[in-house]
């Protein structure tokens, strides 16, 4: 399954690229602030432009690898585990004139033809969930920037 979309920050937020990147970088070390239901994160390995993490969702856990190009993009890679699909999420900074935004690109091993019990395509439901989570990510980045500015 592939899903990709762009979201832009409201001009009145007056964020700069550094603030957006700092917010994204927070997602590496403190993903609980961004991911609903995430109860913990252990850093298993750290390199100059990557970390290997174990993410805890209650009693379940997943391993992922986060790679980044400083100031430009994050890439989250989850390998298929215990019958669960794997996938990648790449979040890239967009600068279009005065507008700042993020491009979210998801690629998963989930079969696009898979149907939910109600007959609706799972990919359609998942795309809506991703879009909502991405809007939350944007809001978290704004909140982090406001807090650093002392305007929380």
Image: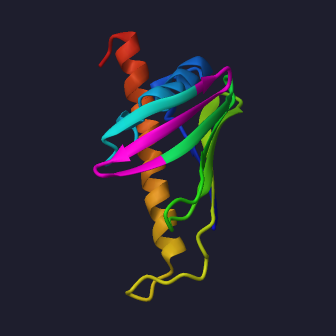
For residue 106, side relative to residue 54 (left or right) = right
Does residue 71 show up? yes
For residue 36, side relative to residue 79 (left or right) = left
For residue 81, side relative to residue 50 (left or right) = left
Near-viewer residue (111 or 17): 111
Magenta stretch contains residue 53 = yes
Please identify the dominant SS of the magenta region: strand
Q: Quadrant of the N terminus?
A: bottom right
Does residue 24 show up? no
Which corner quadrant of the image does residue 108 belong to? bottom right
Write down the region rendered in magenta.
46-62
For residue 69, side relative to residue 25 (left or right) = right
Q: How many marks?
A: 0
Q: Residue at x 29, y 19 (%)?
A: 152
Q: Position of residue 13 (x, y in %)?
A: 46, 26
Outermost residue toward the top in this view:
150
25 versus 61 height, above or below: above
Q: Residue at x 37, y 27 (%)?
A: 143
Magenta stretch contains residue 15 = no
Q: Residue at x 39, y 86 (%)?
A: 117
Q: Position of residue 118 (x, y in %)?
A: 38, 87
Near-viewer residue (132 or 44): 44
């Amino acid at each position: 399954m592939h899903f990709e979309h762009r979201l832009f920050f409201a001009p009145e937020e007056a964020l700069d690229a550094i603030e957006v990147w700092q917010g994204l970088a927070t997602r590496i070390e403190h993903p609980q602030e961004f991911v609903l239901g995430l109860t913990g994160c252990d850093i298993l390995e750290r390199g100059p432009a990557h970390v290997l993490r174990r993410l805890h969702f209650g009693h379940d856990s997943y391993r992922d690898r986060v790679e980044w190009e400083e100031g430009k993009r994050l890439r989250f890679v989850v390998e298929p585990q215990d019958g669960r699909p794997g996938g990648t999420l790449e979040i890239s900074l967009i600068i279009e004139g005065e507008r700042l935004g993020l491009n979210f690109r998801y690629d998963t091993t989930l079969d696009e033809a898979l149907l939910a019990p109600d007959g609706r395509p799972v990919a359609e439901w998942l795309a809506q969930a991703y879009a909502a989570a991405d809007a939350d990510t944007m809001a978290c980045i704004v909140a982090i920037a406001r807090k650093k500015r002392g305007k929380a």
